[in-house]
Amino acid sequence: MSEPPGEYYTEERWHNWLQRVESEELDPEDEDSARLLLNLQDDTAIAVAKILTDFENGEIEEETALGELEEIEEVVLAEREFDSEETAMLIDGVQTSLMCVFYTAQEYVVGGPAEEGTVAGYVEAAAEAEAEEDMEAALGYCVQAGTLVIDGGELDRELADDLEFGLVAEWVNGLDSLQTALADPEVVEEEDGED
């Protein structure tokens, strides 16, 4: 069943996640911290996947889909102050990954999947563009790769793992979350430590 407009994701949900992140001593090397950040990212990707699914199934129009995506994007990408510099940096990484997810979803809704090329080809082109410091082109290639992922293309985990650390690696990380969300759009429980 399609979600009522405005209910795919709420500002309160995002803020609950951020409060949880703030309340824990995050260590990116620690498995629990890494999982918490990934769950935060996946939770947003699931909301995006639900919008795309409802759009594909004809349950919402293009204009509604774009409006919903924009609403979530505004909530998730809004700047926020954190007491800890480490937390701010980690959340910034999640936001960077999700930025590519939003652009990809919007591109797909408006124009559909890329007409040619492969997921791997676009990711490699993005990495080359990043090496040449052409970040606009790099993001464009990642978005094209993402539209193919939405269309059922496969983003190989190994390909993502082989990328140099940088923006393309973060964007592809976001696409990996989107791929997971499209395959299994189950809601991530935000509060699993309260029973």
Image (cartoon, rainbow, N blue to C red):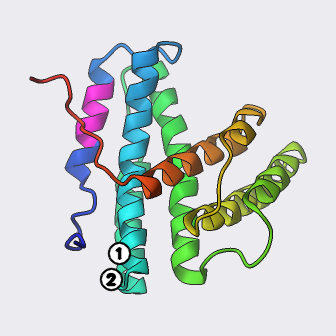
> Is 8 rendered above or below residue 164?
below
Q: Which residue is mark 1?
A: 54
Q: Pinpoint residue 51: horizontal percent, then vertical percent.
A: 37, 69
Q: Is residue 80 visible?
A: no
Q: Which mark is residue 60?
A: 2
Taking the spot 47% from the left edge, 13% from the top edge, the residue there is 30
Residue 16 is a magenta residue: yes
> Is 176 rendered above or below residue 3?
above
Q: Secondary structure at mark 2?
A: loop
Taking the spot 24% from the left edge, 38% from the top edge, the residue there is 189
**Where, by quadrant of the figure, is residue 170 drawn?**
top right
Closer to the camera in the image, 112 or 185: 185
Question: Mark 1: few, some, or many residues within 10 Å (few <14, many ≥20)?
Answer: some
**Where, by quadrant of the figure, is residue 173 drawn?**
top right
Q: Secondary structure at mark 1?
A: helix
**Where, by quadrant of the figure, is residue 74 drawn?**
bottom left
Taking the spot 73% from the left edge, 59% from the top edge, the residue there is 119
Q: Pinpoint residue 113: horizontal percent, then vertical percent.
A: 64, 75
> In the rendered structure, which amino acid carries the disc numbered 2?
Ile
> Is 100 rendered above or below residue 42?
below
Q: Which secondary structure type mostly characterizes the magenta part of the structure?
A: helix
**Quarter of the N terminus within the rendering:** bottom left
Q: Pinpoint residue 28: horizontal percent, then vertical percent.
A: 51, 18
Question: Magenta span covers which residues?
Answer: 15-21
